[in-house]
Amino acid sequence: MKKLILATAIAASFVSTVARAEDAKPDNELSFNAAVVSDYRYRGLTQTRFDPALQVGADYTHNPTGLYAGTWLTNIKWIKDAGALTGTDTKGDVEWDIYGGKRGDIGGGFTYDVGGLYYYYPGNTLANAGLKNANTFELYGQIGYGPGYFKYSQSLTNLFGAVNSKYSQYYDLGANFETFYGVMLGLHVGHQSVRGNPNEASYTDWKIGLSKTFDEVAGITLGVAYVGTDMKDGFATTPASDGAKNVGKNGVVVSISKTF
């Protein structure tokens, strides 16, 4: 009986050790991601005139310290649309994000994430439309607890070409819950404050989304979200040739993505 108990203890110890080894992350972690979305919405506003977008990215994390860096690219239309609205020729059909920061645990169940994000629009000529260069740099800080989080971002440059908009702020409150059969429910509300611009330039956005990752299908994630804003009609629109639609109107966004 003693031998049986000893053997059982050794086996349990071995299984526990293996489990911990499998759960442990490598010191250096590199991943890639790709997605197709029916409409690229950023802070509630369409960036592609309600058309689809192809998006790719890469992320590096140093797990012992929580330091990370990454990059992400997508097609856009809003810079050319700004030119069409003002009767000028503007160029810029790619958004290239470069970011880095540090994340980790504070204690008591709280987490943090701080860093900087540079939005780069190669060769953009948004200034031709009477605005500033579209390139934008923001600092951000996030506090998380359980499924919820609050994130604050502030631009250290003009915000996406808006004149005299340096130090504009964005407030982001959200949560992600696992519901049933591995389906995730994502809730978000945000407020963009655009400094030095008419009140109409500042607005609130929201999103309710569902997503599910299918491990049996190469880890593909499918998502659907209802997105909207309180952006006023006529303040920010697509060109007249496209029906002069409110870029922040409520709508459904469907996505398919994969991380590898």
Image: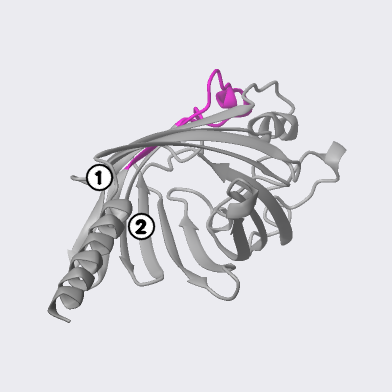
Quickly name the residue at label 1: 63
Which circle, 1 or 2, is nearer the viewer? 1
Tag 2, which secondary structure? Answer: strand
Res 235 seen here? no
* Residue 122 image offset from top left, x and y in percent: 53, 21
CB within 8 Å, label 1 to label 2: no
Write down the quadrant of residue 109 in the picture: bottom left
Residue name at image x 49 percent, y 63 percent? 190
Residue 118 shown in magenta: yes
Q: Is residue 203 left or right of residue 169?
A: right
The crowding category of the residue bearing disc 1, from other C-alpha atoms within 10 Å (few below 14, some 14 to 19, many at least 20), is some
* Residue 68 image offset from top left, x and y in percent: 30, 40
Q: Nearer the viewer, residue 203 or 38?
A: 38
Write down the quadrant of residue 233 in the picture: bottom right
Q: How is the image coloured?
A: one colour
Quickly name the residue at label 2: 152
Residue type at mark 2? Tyr
Tag 1, which secondary structure? Answer: loop
Residue 58 shown in magenta: no
Residue type at mark 1? Asn
Please identify the residue farthest to the bottom as the structure is shown: 1
Q: Is residue 9 above or below residue 63?
A: below
Q: Nearer the viewer, residue 105 or 213?
A: 213
Residue name at image x 51 percent, y 67 percent? 189
Q: Which residues are magenta?
A: 116-135
* Residue 216 image offset from top left, x and y in percent: 62, 53
Residue name at image x 55 percent, y 25 percent? 127
* Residue 75 image offset from top left, x and y in percent: 64, 32
